[in-house]
Image (spheres, rainbow, N blue to C red):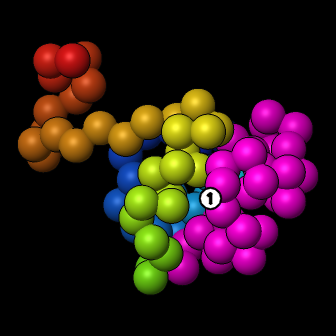
Amino acid sequence: MTNPYGKIRTARELGGLIRHRRKESGFPQADAAALSGVGPRYLSELERGKESAELGKALQVLQRLGLEIWVLPRGATPEKADD
């Protein structure tokens, strides 16, 4: 994965980005799950792009791995958005 960061269109893309960031940070899956306050099974399913993954837990994982989600109108970019 060259540059996994950017627009996310599917649960699979989000999962791949989370997996990439976890590995980039050097965390084994079990350690990243514990740090995020979720179980290893949940993190595994999230990384595989399971569409029924609970949003609140997914947001916990993103936050603990130093990632954030922006919701913008189509065509807008974070550089054009207000904080």
Q: Nearer the viewer, residue 22 or 36?
A: 36
Whether residue 1 can be seen here: no
Question: Is 37 placed left or right of 67 in the picture?
Answer: right
Which stretch appears magenta? 21-50
> What residue is at 74 percent from the left and 57 percent from the top?
33
Q: Position of residue 68 (x, y in %)?
A: 44, 36
Which residue carries the number 1 mark? 16
Residue at image location 29% in from the left, 38% down from the top: 70
In the depicted structure, whether residue 30 falls above or below residue 76:
below
| Visible residue check, residue 40 | yes
Where residue 62 sits, quadrant-wise, is top right
Q: Taken as a whole, is the magenta stretch helix, strand or loop?
A: helix
Residue 49 in the magenta stretch? The answer is yes
Residue furthest front as drawn: 37
Vertical placement of 33 versus 67: above or below? below
Q: Quadrant of the C terminus?
A: top left
> 11 left or right of 2?
left
**Residue 72 horizontal/vertical position (percent):** 17, 40
Q: How many marks?
A: 1
Does 23 sit left or right of 68 as displayed?
Answer: right
Q: Residue at x 22, y 28 (%)?
A: 77
Above or below for 47 versus 70: below
Say if 82 sits above or below 46 in the image: above
Q: Nearer the viewer, residue 63 or 74?
A: 63
The part of the image, by quadrant, that contains residue 55 is bottom left
Please say whether residue 36 is one of the residues in the magenta stretch: yes
Question: Looking at the picture, how far across and down is residue 67, in whole percent?
Answer: 52, 35
Label 1 element class = helix
Residue 33 shown left or right of residue 30 in the figure: left
Say few, some or many: other residues with alpha carbon within 10 Å of mark 1 (under 14 / 14 to 19 / 20 or more). Answer: some
Residue 9 x %, y %: 35, 61
The amino acid pointed to by label 1 is Gly
